[in-house]
Amino acid sequence: MTATALDEMPTPPCAQLLGWHILEAEPERGWIRIGFRGRPEFVNPAGYVQGGFLAAMLDDCMGPAAFIASHGALYTATMDMNVSYLAPARPGPLVGEGQVVQMGKSVAFLEARLFDPEGVLVARATSTARLVATEKALTRAARSA
């Protein structure tokens, strides 16, 4: 697999909860494929993964796409996110793809898609994110911890 700036970063607890793991990455394209685990604890009364968890998975594809595209220099802070739920997601493995659509000096436009094991598109999202120097973002996070 291609080395990325994420290789040097510890996986945050929220990503660990989602079963986040890199499957493929193309930093020069600003593209990443990430595996997730729809845990039984994530299901709604109908037995499908609740939409908030799917949204978190989509968000956890878009930010890393921008991070690897900037070679770790820029961290994203989501300003807005629009999610479309297209099919129910059963518990189990899910695969997300994140893509940088356009990245400027202070704002990025991102998109993501989430698939079930059969390749069915279960959800998609677009977002606008503020770009912050990674060093500044991590310093702020450490101060507030």
Image: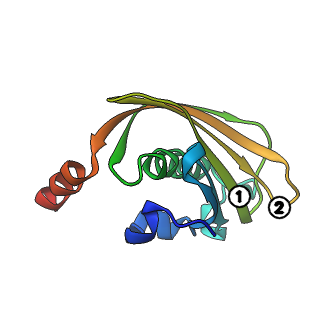
Residue in the image at 66% along x and 69% along y: 40
Depth check: 15 or 51 in front?
Answer: 15
Q: Which quarter of the rendering shows the N terminus? A: bottom right
Where residue 95 is drawn, which disc sits there?
Answer: 1
Question: Left or right of 107: which side holds 97?
Answer: right
* Residue drawn at the location 43% of the way across and 50% of the way down: 67
Image location (x, y in percent) of residue 55? 57, 45
Question: Which mark, residue 117?
Answer: 2
The answer to whether residue 85 is left or right of residue 99 is right
Q: Quadrant of the C terminus?
A: bottom left
Depth order, front residue of 102/58: 102
Asked whether the beta carbons under mark 2 and mark 1 sit within 8 Å of each other, the answer is yes
Q: What amino acid is found at the position of numbered circle 2 in the picture?
A: Pro
Of mark 2 and mark 1, the one earlier in the sequence is 1
- Residue at horizontal 44%, vertical 63%? 6
Residue most toward the left? 143
**Disc 1 residue type (three-letter):** Val
SS class of the residue under badge 1?
A: strand
Is label 2 in a helix, a strand or a loop? Answer: loop
Is residue 80 visible in the rendered structure shown here? no
Answer few, some or many: residues within 10 Å of disc 1's Cα (few below 14, many 20 plus, some between 14 and 19): many
**Cα–Cα span, label 2 and label 1:** 8 Å
Horizontal arrangement in the rendering, residue 48 relative to residue 71 (left or right):
right
User: Residue 27: x, y in percent?
Assistant: 54, 51
Residue placed most toward the observer, 98 or 15: 98
* Viewer can see residue 103: yes
- Residue at the spot x=77%, y=37% of the render? 86
